[in-house]
Image (cartoon, grey):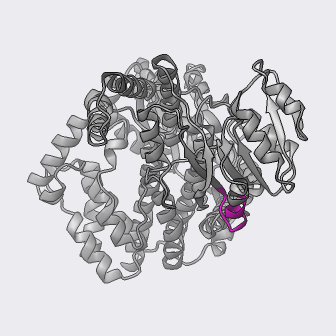
Amino acid sequence: MPHVVRTLDALTNDPALRVTVIDSGSTDGSLEVARSRAVTLVEITRYVPGQVLNDAMERTSSPIVAFVNADAVPLAADAVRRLVHACENGAAASYGRQLARPSARPITQTDHTRAFPPNPEGPGFRHFFSMACSAIRRDFWQALPFDPHLRYSEDVDWTWRVRALGASIVYVPDALFEHSHDYDAASLRRRMLGEAEADRAIFRTVPRGLVRGLALPLAAQLTRDVRQGLVSLPAMQLRAVAQRARFDGARIQTQAAATTRLQPSGTTLGRDPRAEQVVTDALSCASQVFTEGLGSRLLALVLLGSFGAGEGAVEVTDGIPRIHNDLDLVAVVANSQEARSLREPCRVLAERASTLAGAVIDVWPVGRDELADPKGKLLWVDAAVRGGRVLTGDLTVMRPLDSLGPRSVASGELGRLLVNRATGLALSRLAFEAGDDEAVRGARHVAKAALALGDALLVTVDQYPATLRARLEVLQRLAKVGAPFVRQIETAYAQAIAFREAPTEARVLLPALEQACQHLWGPFASMEAHRLGTLAATPMDYAEARGARFPELSDVSALGRTLGGLRGALSHTVPWRASRWHPRESLARAAVVLAFEADRRRSYEEARRWLRVSESTPQGFRNTLERLRDIAS
């Protein structure tokens, strides 16, 4: 009150609108106003934004539904119609222009002018949306409901996830509404704290330090205020309160929705008894090698990846099963320091176990402290959702992962996943051109790349079930409303699953290596465009415009990045202009170009600019680069 009177009068005067009022126990007279109007009244006892929005959609039936806050007063008779019209023309969602109330203080007026400009391009932020006066399409909501767990920014979250499907979110400046709030310091801090916490969950960001996270943004805001004539102590205090709250909120890790870890009954997709026995024997051999080799330092040996989730691939040739995928093991030790010291011993033990077991066995030592603080790594979120198998040692070692979910994955981790799969494609493509027998291996890399694209999309939209088949069902649902690249991902994902179920027989389901790489470039570019905010038309454009992305990763510190980049520049691993980059950036750019660029000659030339190696380059990184470089040369 009193704005709800004007709002309901404007809405009920339009006979084309069916109005539903949802009230959570108002005591200021709003409820009585609603009862006196020709509306459907729904009274609820508890207001949780996402739950209320989902319930509102379920209670209505229109293909397009508009949402208007009770105090967002339409300033034109056709304001809501304009929002609906934008959705009828293809937008997944639209939002109107909010003018501050005439009585609003200057700082509120200025903020509204910046957030809701008169031009249709909108404010130019990375992503922005306001549910206060908006419209959405039902088909997109059915594919992706609102998150019922977020306490703030549920509208920003929903539209951000919808945009990951290639959908458009439209700002309609001609749809005018009057809506603003003059927050006091306490209310402003509470709101900014909640929004910053939500932003971290939505955009999967890594908290910034005091300078980049607090001092510089505050200085930029105050400078902007000075230029606009907002020079007053109360305004400066509010800016300081808001920015400090955003800084504090960005450091809060939102509790992920509870997940039920999968408990697979086997290790392979086909559940063929012969294949299961081959895997069991290989794991038994590996357990013995690592138990003897690490002794009391080994707290637990855990099987993760596809075999840990019960979805491993086994190829049957002439009736003899052979393990197709790598066996991914994690050796859990006391702490991260001990884990670092055991990397080389574990590598040696892994080679021995692979020889004895007749399968490729990868082992990575981790400290128990990393399980308690996974730092946004996809590996641990995947283990939390898909499950894993403790082969030997402490059976409770994975319990700290129980609280993880898709929102726990850092944005940089998704970029790393896609680039890693691009590296596999590059290796197979180059080896295939060099005359190596890469038929099966190339198909495997194509399948892994397809699964990575699908998984990255599912994590982004916060829909990440435990099994491959369940994930495919979600992708099929998303493909019905998403852009063409979503359908490409869904099709490739289905082919990859078929390949895993029968690597020998299903090989024909995968396109030729060259064709597959070209087919996957569009989805790769679209996924990275959503994550990074810039669309690369070609793989070479991506290599040039990528920017330094490894700083987003929790395991690449600022000091390590600086020293690694400087060392790379001095040793000609990376160009001087890229001295601030981590050396892995060279591989990222080269791999994408070599994997997806159709013009092979140009891809070689581009890759040569990035693939420079010296004795100071880390060994594993150098080996990969040398293979790529030698073939490309």
Nearer-the-camera pick, 270 or 293: 270
Residue 39 spot, x, y in % from top left? 88, 40
96 or 393, which lies in front?
96
Query: Looking at the rendering, in which quadrant would you find the N terminus?
Result: top right
Q: Outermost residue toward the front?
A: 102
For the record, the magenta segment spans 84-93
Quadrant of residue 29 within the rendered picture: top right
Quadrant for residue 221, please give it: top left
Tell me if residue 557 is in the magenta stretch: no
Seen at 47% across and 53% down, the residue is 117
Split into 4 quadrants, where in the image is the C terminus? bottom left
Q: Is residue 493 left or right of residue 379?
A: right
Q: Using the rendered image of the protein, determine whether residue 464 is visible from the camera's viewpoint.
A: no
Question: Does the rendering let one see residue 273?
Answer: yes
- Residue closest to the eye, 196 or 294: 196
Q: Position of residue 552 (x, y in %)?
A: 36, 42
Q: Quadrant of residue 263?
A: top right
With respect to residue 314, does 188 lie above or below?
above
Q: Is residue 316 above or below residue 342?
A: below
Image point (22%, 47%), residue name: 618
Residue 26: x percent and y percent?
77, 21
Q: Which residue lies at the image location 31% right of the left edge and 63% below the top edge?
A: 545
